[in-house]
Image (cartoon, rainbow, N blue to C red):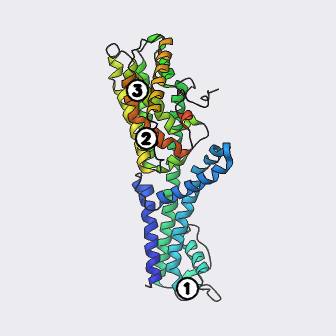
Amino acid sequence: MTIEQIGGAALMTLFLADIFLTVLYARAGTGLLAPRWNRLVWAAMSGVSGLFGRRRGAVLSYAGPLIVILLILFWALGLTIGAAMIVQPELGTAIRPSSGDTPKDFVTALLVAGNSLSIVGGGDYSPHSAGMRLLYLFNSLIGGAVLSLVLSYLVQLYSGLRERNALALTVELMTGGTGDAAEMLARLAPDGDFSDTVSELGNLVRPLTQTKEAHHFYPLLFYFRFEEPYYSVSRLCFILLDLTTLIDTALDREKHKGLVRSAPVGALRQGAEMLLDTLDRNFPTVQETSGGAAEGRTSAQSYAAAVETLRRAGIETRQDTGSYADQRSRWEPLIRRVAPTLGYRMHEIDCRAPHAAAPARVMP
């Protein structure tokens, strides 16, 4: 084998390993090339979207599907170039057309390699040595296997996306389209009746854990952004974390200890934090900027507004601003790192914030 052929074999091995780690091993952050390629495409899309002003969100909504297409092309091109590096030294000798002279340029090598990788096949060039016949057979097996794996990966990816959106929309509807966790809690306990609250919250645990694992198995999900903020992972997690924090700090712990200490409340809190942590550790989230005393005032004002909402709904409350601010300070930084990465502003995520510049979108 020539040095070129050894390099081609190494390149094919690298891309096959990347496909294996991305599609089969399926763990966030384990890919060799795909994570870097996806970030590069996202960075380019993010830069271009800035030219569209208020339509930036609409442009970014195309990023997820575009990244999928470009990743498949990236893999196909990498495998084809690797195979072409193996094929080119054999042109005119072990690989020849049925008639006429054999061009020996790299473009011809790419054509031959692409045909050998294609499950359709075709082309005038055929192998005339045992080694090249084995290469053609190996390439055809690779082409068929990669195509099947990619199709299966796409089915699972979009299934995970649908489930994530269904959960986000469910939570949004439970807030009455306000995105306010206090409204959600008030609706879960009409006139102060908490008899069904634990059960209702329990129904959210399974889809939340499925969403968390979907982002762990299929990291590409992170780049699927929708124009509607209520579909964002950041807003979904913010509502759930704010809800569990309010349950712990605004309700009478002795009177409602069954709810406060219930498994669904703890599972929702931990699941939302795990989801945010997965995104924060494996994607290029923005550097957090601390608001210091201003954020403390915002937490206090938000808590006061939440307590007032609960009181109007006929729910007995207690005042524990310090505990609320302390708990929120532990999970809010994750939100502030993840949300801006996908182009969302905090007033779209925290719909009860006193400083919100725009109202939450109410579901029709």
Relative depth, front residue between 148 and 352: 352
Mark 2 or 1: the one toward you: 2
Q: Residues within 10 Å of mark 1 (few under 14, many from 20)?
A: many
Quadrant for the C terminus, please: top right
Horizontally, is 181 left or right of 177 in the view? Answer: left
Secondary structure beneath dot 3 equals helix
Relative depth, front residue between 41 and 197: 41
Horizontally, is 284 left or right of 54 in the view? Answer: left
Q: Report the residue marked by disc 2.
A: 276
Q: How many marks?
A: 3
**Place of residue 216 in the rendered image (x, y in percent of width and height, measured from the top left):** 42, 47
Residue 68 visible: no
Mark 3 or 1: the one toward you: 3
Q: Amino acid at mark 1?
A: Leu
Looking at the image, residue 9 lies above or below residue 201: below
Q: Residue drawn 46% across and 16% down?
A: 189
Q: Residue drawn 49% across and 71% down?
A: 139
Image disc number at residue 91? 1
Q: Residue drawn 57% across and 44% down?
A: 343
**Place of residue 360 in the rendered image (x, y in percent of width and height, measured from the top left):** 59, 29
Q: Give the mark, 3 or 1, whose residue is nearer the N terminus.
A: 1
Horizontally, is 239 left or right of 274 in the view? Answer: right
Q: Quadrant of residue 326?
A: top left
